[in-house]
Image (cartoon, helix red, strand yellow):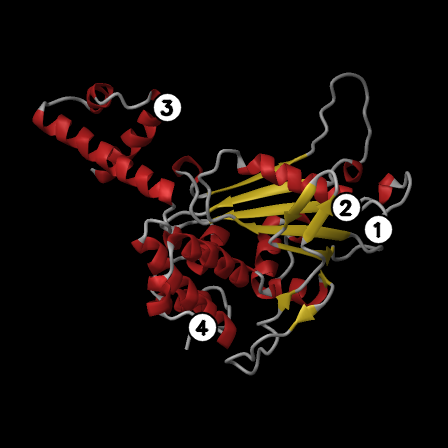
Amino acid sequence: MSEISTELAMSLTAAEARARLDTAAKKLIKHRIILAEIMRQCVEEFKGYERSYIMENCFVGEVRMNEISVDQDVPDADSSIVGSDTEDNSDSEGLIRYDLVFDAVVPDTQKIIRLVINIEIQVDTYLTYSIVTRAIYYLARLISRQKGTVFNHSDYDKIQKVYSIWICPDPKMQNKNSIAEYGFTQQKVFGRVNEAAENYDKMKAIIISLNDEGQENRNDLIRLLSTLLSTTESVESRKQILEEEYNIPMTRQIDEEVLDMCNLGMAVEMRGVEKGLQKGIEKGIEKGILSSIKNLMETMKLTAQQAMDALKVPKEEQASYAAMLASAE
C-alpha cells in the first residue's frame, strides 16, 4: 500500500501537494539505475558506455540499499545515491540546497577524474528568472566549494568538472521537448591559441524539458523521464513501459513511488497545481484563444492571421498558434 493514499492526496492543500510532488519526483530520479541512464545520454564523459557499467563502476561515495527488489535477480537495482553534502553554506552568499549531489569517476582514465553532478527537479517552471541563470549560479557554487577540499592555495588545475542537470517536467510551451547544453567554449579572437579543452571545460548546465506527450517522443531520454514523472498516465501503463522498453525493474520502492506520483498528481490536478497555478491560467487562456481564433475564422471567414490580429495575439506567439491550428487540421 502506498504511503500516500489517494484519499490523503486529495485532502492536501495546493502548497502541500506541490511540495510533495517535487519530493516524489526527486525520489524517483535518485535511483542509481535512473541516474546512470541520464549520465549515459547527457554527460559526454559517459556516452557510449552501457548503463550497467556506469552503475557498477562510476559512482563514488556511499550507496544506500533500500527496499528489496521484487525480482530477486536484481537486488541492487533499487540502490539510491546518498552522495556528498547537498547543502552549500556561505556567510556571505547564504544557504542553497541541491536536490542531489554526488561524485562520479570517468571510465577508462589513467587517473581518477571526479565529476560533481547536480540533479535538479524543477516542477515550478513559471519563474521570474531563467532556469539557465540559476543553473550557472549553482555551477559557480559547486566550483567554489572545492577550495580547501579539492584544491588549496593556487592549485587551480585540480578543479573538478561539475554538471548541473535540470529536469523540467512541465516547461513553458516554447521549451517543451528539448535538451540544451550550456558551457565554456574557446573562441579564438586573434592570434594562435592552444589551450587544452580540459583547462576551460570545467562546468556544464544541461536543461531537459519534457512534454505532456512524452510517451510519443522520439528522444529516448525525454520519453523515459516523461514516463517516469508523469502524473496523468496510469500506473500500469508507466510500469509496463519502464520494464519492457527500458529494462527498469519495478522494485517495491520504485513501485510505490510511481503510485505516489499518480496520487499526488491527482491532488495537484484538482487544485490547478500540477499544471502550475500560473500554467493553469495560461493553459486556459491558450485554449480559449485557440478556440476564439477558430470561431472567427469560421464565422467571419477570416484567415488565421486576420483572426489573430483581430484578437491582438502578440506577434511572438502567433507562430505557435498557427502551428497548433495546422496540426489540428
Point 71% across, 25% down: residue: 187
Q: State the separation of the CA atoms marked 2 and 3.
A: 41 Å
Pointer 3: what residue? 316
User: Can residue 251 be seen in the rendering of this structure?
Assistant: no
Is label 1 or label 3 in front? Answer: 1
Q: State the separation of the CA atoms marked 2 and 4.
A: 37 Å
- Where disc 2 sits, the SS reads loop
Q: Earlier in the sequence, mark 1 or mark 3?
A: 1
Q: Earlier in the sequence, mark 3 or mark 4?
A: 4
Give neighbour class at mark 3: few <14, some 14-19, many 20+ (Cα, 10 Å). few
Type of amino acid at the residue the image marks with label 1: Thr
Is label 3 or label 4 in front? Answer: 4
Q: Up-down: is 89 above or below 62?
A: above
Pointer 2: what residue? 145
Is label 2 or label 3 in front? Answer: 2
Q: State the separation of the CA atoms marked 1 and 4.
A: 39 Å
- Where disc 1 sits, the SS reads loop
Point 74% across, 64% down: residue: 61
Would residue 287 be found to the left or right of residue 231 on screen?
left
- Where disc 4 sits, the SS reads loop
Q: State the separation of the CA atoms marked 1 and 3.
A: 48 Å
Q: Earlier in the sequence, mark 1 or mark 4?
A: 4
Residue located farthest toward the top when viewing the structure as drawn: 190
Type of amino acid at the residue the image marks with label 4: Glu
Q: Up-down: is 215 above or below 185?
A: below
Residue 149 disc label: 1
Q: Earlier in the sequence, mark 2 or mark 3?
A: 2
User: Can residue 49 be seen in the rendering of this structure?
Assistant: yes
Which of these two is toward me, 91 or 85? 91
Picture coordinates of residue 198, whole percent (x, y): 78, 40
